[in-house]
Image (cartoon, helix red, strand yellow):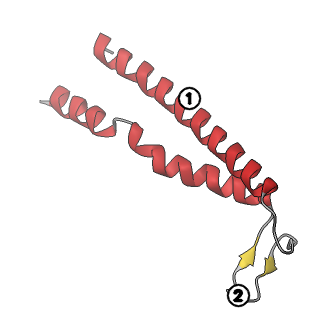
Amino acid sequence: MSHLEHRLNTLVMIICALQAVLCTLMAIGCKTFLTNTVYDDKFAMSAIDKETKLPVYSDSIYAVINFFTYFLLLNTLLPISLQVCMEFCKFF
């Protein structure tokens, strides 16, 4: 493994850790916002909203869903095309 590949792998691990920290902070912020928001009536987990006919989950479930949503949105931080380009150049 070359010095450049080793450095790139280290940076990718740092970016993944940063991405996990950011997603966790945003999920905690979502949970805090949902907990402090006043609802007309709270539904139990997997209850059905009468107007939209969609399931309504607890605040914690929404926070977990938002964690993975933010993880997908922040996935563009990873330089995957750079790794592909390095492997392609190394092949030729």
Instruction: Choose top left, top right, bottom left or bottom right for residue 69.
Output: bottom right
Q: Position of residue 51 (x, y in %)?
A: 71, 89
Disc 2 crowd, CA 10 A, few/some/many (<14, 14-19, 20+)? few
Instruction: Choose top left, top right, bottom left or bottom right for residue 9.
Output: top left
Instruction: Choose top left, top right, bottom left or bottom right for residue 47.
Output: bottom right
Find disc 1 in the rendering and name its residue: 17
Residue furthest left in the image: 92
User: Which residue sits at x=63%, y=44%?
Assistant: 26
Q: Nearer the viewer, mark 1 or mark 2?
A: 2
**What's the mark number on residue 71?**
none
Q: Is residue 88 found left or right of 79 in the rendered image?
A: left
Marks 1 and 2 sit apart, C-alpha to C-alpha, by 38 Å
Q: Is residue 86 found left or right of 40 in the rendered image?
A: left
Q: Element type at marker 2?
A: loop
Residue type, numbered disc 1: Ala
Point out the image quarter for the C terminus. top left
Find disc 2 in the rendering and name its residue: 53
Q: Is residue 2 visible?
A: no
Would you place residue 43 above or below residue 85 in this image?
Answer: below
User: Which residue sits at x=45%, y=44%?
Assistant: 75
Q: Is residue 22 visible?
A: yes
Would you place residue 39 above or below residue 90 in this image?
Answer: below
- Count of numbered labels shown in the rendering: 2
Q: Nearer the viewer, residue 41 or 31?
A: 41
Q: Position of residue 21 (x, y in %)?
A: 61, 33
